[in-house]
Amino acid sequence: MYDLCVKMINWKNNKAPEPPYYASIFHYYLGDDLEGYAAMDDITLELAQQNPGYLGYESHKSNGRGSFISYWKDLESIDEWRKNSTHIKAKAEGMKRWYKYYHSMIAKVESARFHEL
């Protein structure tokens, strides 16, 4: 039903959820010191996926600029992820050296439509 969407957004169990749900949106510019960044990126993604409220993610990166959007069942699930000790360490390293700039937002998804040819 959502084949192309599933490829663009990595939904948990390959199934788009029914709204409402939440999106945690993270936009960034990478810094010059990226030692350990890729490994921590893999670790944090794997840990986030273990959270019961995790629904999926999408990621885009080009020329040092990127976006990472994770989808969550509710605000409590996002808060649980925010409190994860490994995630806290990753954010500290990000602020210290991995990112020149970033901003993050939480948005409630009230409606979602998918189209594919």
Image (tube, rainbow, N blue to C red):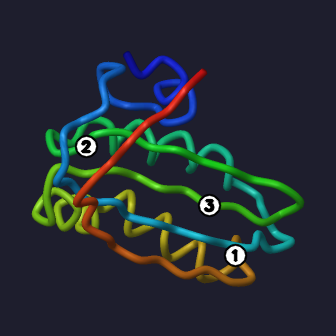
Q: Secondary structure at mark 1?
A: strand
Mark 3 or mark 2: which comes first in sequence?
2
Residue positioned 23% across, 36% down in the render: 17
**Which percent across, then down, holds residue 102?**
61, 80
Look at the numbered discs 1 and 2 and tell me whether their residues touch, using CB distance below 8 Å. no
Taking depth in this image into account, of 50 and 111 the one nearest to the observer is: 111
The amino acid type of the residue labelled 3 equals Ser
The amino acid type of the residue labelled 1 equals Tyr
Residue positioned 16% across, 49% down in the render: 73
Count every numbered label the image shows and give the total: 3
Q: Is residue 97 above or below residue 36?
A: below
Classify residue 45 by image quadrant.
Answer: top left
**Which percent across, then down, holds residue 25?**
46, 66
Residue 54 shows which numbered tag?
A: 2
Q: Which residue is mark 3?
A: 67
Q: Which residue is mark 1?
A: 99
Mark 1 or mark 2: which comes first in sequence?
2
Residue positioned 44% across, 67% down in the render: 89
The alpha-carbon separation of the residues under discs 1 and 3 comes to: 12 Å
Graded by Cα atoms within 10 Å as few (under 14), some (14 to 19) or many (20 or more), the crowding at tag 3 reads some
Look at the numbered discs 1 and 3 and tell me whether their residues touch, using CB distance below 8 Å. no
Q: Secondary structure at mark 3?
A: strand
**Which percent across, then down, holds residue 37?**
67, 55
